[in-house]
Amino acid sequence: MKLDILDIQEFLPHRYPFLLVDKVVECEPGVRLLAVKNVTYNEPFFQGHFPHMPVFPGVLILEALAQATGLLASETAPDELGKGMTYFLVGIDKAKFKRTVGPGDQIMLEARFLRSKRNIWAFDCRAEVDGEFVASAEIRCAAVVD
């Protein structure tokens, strides 16, 4: 299953400049999702991070991965995580960063479902650029009634 930006906006409440997933290229509900974030020079944070060498903030890589988990969770349990629910980031463990990301890079965001208990969902996440490891983390999110 593939999702374009219009499909993504149906699932995620985020909007510019905080929507950090451009498209989903693969999704196997309950298993894995692979998404894309295209990094462009006109992203607002590059003015200050850093003017002499634009670096995509690591915390935003983690946020992009968390958004990917929201899409995988939504596809996995559409009845549980549908209308009237908001999906919040509640934990990040084992975060690692290997290299910087900058304008022109395309980040491949992978989320793998680990488990869910009650309203808490856990995922193993990884980000790559050109097949090189960029960042990884175990991310937990919770579905909350609006």
Image (tube, rainbow, N blue to C red):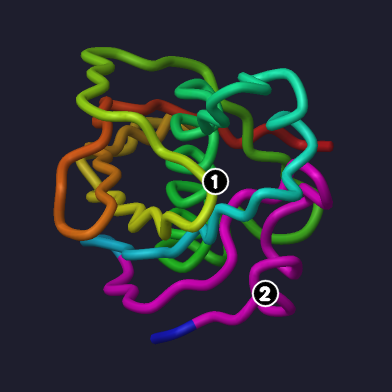
Which amino acid is tagged 1? Gln
Residue beneath the point at 48% across and 38% down? 66
> Magenta segment range?
3-29
Q: Residue furthest front?
A: 52
User: In x, y percent, where is residue 116?
Assistant: 33, 37
Which amino acid is tagged 2? Ile
Q: Which residue is mark 1?
A: 67
Assign a secondary structure to mark 1.
Answer: helix
Residue 38 is a magenta residue: no
Q: Which sits in the foreground, 107 or 119?
A: 107
Quarter the C terminus occupies: top right
Residue beneath the point at 74% across and 78% down? 6
Left or right, 13 with reference to 71 = right
**Position above or below: 81 against 28:** above
Q: Residues within 10 Å of mark 2 (few under 14, many from 20)?
A: few
Asked whether the residues under the numbered discs 2 and 1 touch, taking CB atoms below 8 Å apart as contact, a structural biologist would say: no
